[in-house]
Image (tube, grey):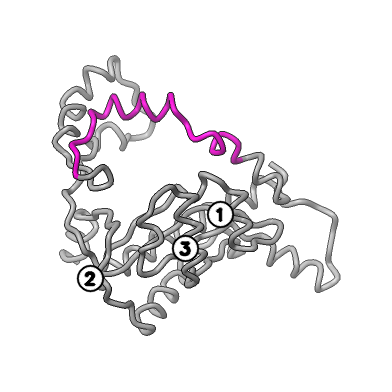
Amino acid sequence: MDKLIKRVNEHRTIREFTDEKVSKENLDIIFDSIMRTATSTGMQMASVIHITDPKAKLELSKVCNQEYVARATELLVFIVDNYRNHRIMKDTNNFIEKESDGDTFFQGYTDAILMAQNATTIIESMGMGAVYLGSILNDPEKVIEILNLPPLTFPVLGLGFGYPNQSPQLKPRLNKKYRIFENEYKVFDDYGEELKEYDQEMTSYYDLREGNRRSDSFFKQVVSKTKNPIPKRLKLIEYAKGNGFKL
C-alpha cells in the first residue's frame, strides 16, 4: 500500500521513451485493467483504439502539435462509444430513431477518462511512464477521420506510454485547501494574494516540453492559455453534434 501511495503521489508526465518494447503480456494486463474500470450504469459506453500504425501515430502527432507523440512506444486513444449500443438496439429489432443525448455522451466521456487513469496506474506499477494527450482535441474532425470513427463516437483523450527515457521534476501543485472543500464550495477574497507563493513556486519548475526552460508563473500561464485558445477546441460540442450526438 505504501508503494502504491508513493507511486501515485510521485506521478510525473513522461514524454520520451527508450527503445524497449512493451511485452504482449504487459499489454494484455493493461487492457484487462481498462476493461475492469467502473462504468456508468453498466452500459460500457467507451472504447479504446490501440494505435500501432506509424503513419497514424504521425498524423495524430500533427493534430497534437507534439512530435513526441509519434515516438511513443505505445499509443492509445480513448473514445466515447455509443455506436455499439445503438447497433445492439437496431440489430435486436428494438431500434428507435433517437440520437444519443447529452446524458449518454457524458456517461461515455466519464468512462473514457476513468479507463485512462486505470491504465496509467497499472502502467506506472510496471516501471513505465505515460503522457496524457488532451491535445487530440485540437482537431476532433481529423482524429475521427484518422481513426475511422463511426457516428455516435468521439475522441476524448490520448495516452502514450513506454519505458522512461527522462526524469522530469515533480511539478508543483496548488495546496489542497484550494481544491478540496468540505460540504460547500469555498470562495476566497483575493486569489492573487492567496496564490502568490504558488505563483512564484511554478517558476522553479523546468518544463521539458520547452527545452528544459523555466516555467512562467502560474498566473501568466492562466492568462496566456485563457486569452489564446486553440480555435477548434472552442467548437467541441459542435463537432460532437456533427458525429451524431444530440447535445
Report x, y in % for residue 164: 23, 65
- The amino acid at mark 2 is Gly
Helix, strand or loop status at disc 2: loop
Q: Residues within 10 Å of mark 1 (few under 14, many from 20)?
A: many
- Which is more toward the observer, 225 or 41? 225
Per the model, the C-alpha gap separating discs 2 and 1 is: 27 Å
Q: Residues within 10 Å of mark 2 (few under 14, many from 20)?
A: few
Quadrant hosting residue 118? bottom left
Magenta segment range? 212-236
Left or right of 142, for residue 24: left
Left or right of 83, for residue 24: left
- The amino acid at mark 3 is Lys
Q: Residue at x 43, y 47 (%)?
A: 65
What residue sits right under mark 3 in the picture? 57
Q: Residue at x 19, y 34 (%)?
A: 202
Lower sequence index among marks 1 and 3: 3
Looking at the image, the residue that sits furthest to the bottom is 25
Q: Residue at x 49, y 35 (%)?
A: 230
**Magenta stretch: helix, strand or loop mostly:** helix
- The amino acid at mark 1 is Pro
Report x, y in % for residue 19: 27, 73
